[in-house]
Image: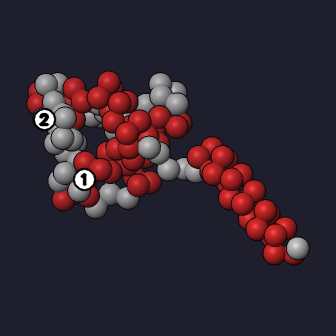
Amino acid sequence: MKSRNMFAFVVAAVGLWALVQPAWSAGGDPAKGKAVYEQRCLACHGTQGKGDGPTGKVLIPPAADFTSAASKKKSDADLLKTIENGKPPTAMVAWKGLLSDQDIQHVLAYVKTLRK
């Protein structure tokens, strides 16, 4: 009987964890991030994140190339800070307040896929 109760408890705990985990997880969904990226970031950073979007090509300094060695060295915290706060005096705007915190996490997750 004890093992049956323990099994039920574990199943319930795993089910509850699966329901609440996305709400408290800091990680984003790259698929959702791609949709936001295509709407908000693609013009500057380009389809592959090389900074070669139609607008990115004419910016001074140019838009960041997420595939570069320098970009690959940046921590998640550094990338998140740039997404949230922008990068003065460049054209990189602050997205905090314009995008939800979750959308920012999604974009971060997608940008990380471009760095590979």
Q: Residue 39's image quarter?
A: top left
Q: Nearer the viewer, residue 33 or 49?
A: 33
Few, some or many residues within 10 Å of mark 2 (<14, 14–19, 20+): many
Which residue is located at x 79 percent, y 63 percent? Answer: 9
Give the labeled residue for mark 2.
52
**Image quadrant occupied by the N terminus:** bottom right
Q: Residue 33's image quarter?
A: top left
Q: Amino acid at mark 2?
A: Asp
Answer yes or no: is residue 88 visible: no
Which residue is located at x 18 percent, y 41 percent? Answer: 48
Instruction: Check residue 115 in the rendering and tell me which mark sits there, or answer none.
Output: 1
Dot 1 or dot 2: first in sequence order is 2
Residue furthest right as drawn: 1
> How many circles with numbers are drawn on the protein?
2
Which residue is located at x 74 percent, y 65 percent? Answer: 10
Foreground disc of the pair 1, 2: 1
Which residue is located at x 16 percent, y 30 percent? Answer: 53
62 vs 5: above or below: above
Q: Amino acid at mark 1?
A: Arg
